[in-house]
Image: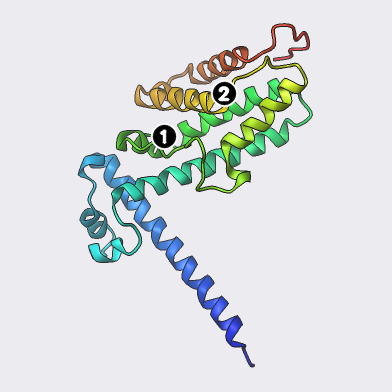
Amino acid sequence: MHISMEVFIIGTKERREKEIESMKKIILEAAIKIIKDEGYDNLTMRKIANAIDYTPTAIYSYYKDKAEIVFDISLQLRKRTVSEVKVDLEKNKELTVDVQLKSAFKVFIQCCAEYSEMASIIMKSGTKAIFGPNEESVSPDENGVLILNHYLKLGQQEMIFRKLDDNISWMLITALIGFSINSIESNLHLSKDWDNLVEVYAEMLINGIMNKNYEGRSI
């Protein structure tokens, strides 16, 4: 069976990409465990290497430093969160935009709580990467700010939301992150009242952008 050089090169490239992805996953899992057990300040490339029986040099071929590792952790959390939010928005697409967004806000918070270890690591590292204002490192359909902008614009067009500031998407996402992180740090996400707290907070955010003259509110 003859295989063209082009097909061989493509196959080799895809196999190499999968190997890199698999290795990065192993590195990230080791880093998360070390940070959880010893704290972010005690994370080193050597400790990661020892944990997975690799040399530090091998780790550096995938990540230049621990800040880059934490950035990758933040990308994973962002992708998981945006993916779950998109599923929720699709599920509720027949509802009014205020109801859709309130539900999406709740999903956002619950997702951060579900992956609390990742969220805590990002906060303790001091990185701002979790949901940057421009989100240049992700595709448009994974960009939380663009997705939120779409629904906020729709809500204004339908007179459900009041006239909003151009930076409202980033402000709302910052508020959601702040609530999520602080709740994780104080273990509120483990309390029996957690779901009710999430409900109240999401309601508060929606109330802040509602058009006071809108009479069809169904939340």
Judged by depth in the image, the label closer to the viewer, 1 or 2, is 2
Indicate whether 96 appears above or below 204: below
The residue located at (63%, 22%) in the rendering is 102
The residue located at (40%, 58%) in the rendering is 24
The image quarter in which residue 215 lies: top right
Q: Which mark is residue 62?
A: none
Indicate whether 6 appears above or below 57: below
Count of residue discs = 2
Q: Amino acid at mark 1?
A: Ser
- Residue 191, given in percent of the width and then of the height, sits at 43, 20
- Residue 63, given in percent of the width and then of the height, sits at 33, 57
Do the CB atoms of the residues marked 1 and 2 lie less than 8 Å apart?
Answer: no
Horizontal placement of 86 versus 181: left or right?
right
Colour scheme: rainbow
Q: Amino acid at mark 2?
A: Ile
Q: Which residue is mark 1?
A: 116
Indicate whether 132 appears above or below 13: above
The span from disc 1 to disc 2 (Cα, nearest Å) is 25 Å
Looking at the image, tell me whether mark 1 or mark 2 is earlier in sequence order: 1
Q: Which mark is residue 168?
A: 2
| Local SS, label 1 | helix
**In front: 156, or 116?**
156
Seen as rendered, the residue at the extreme bottom is 1
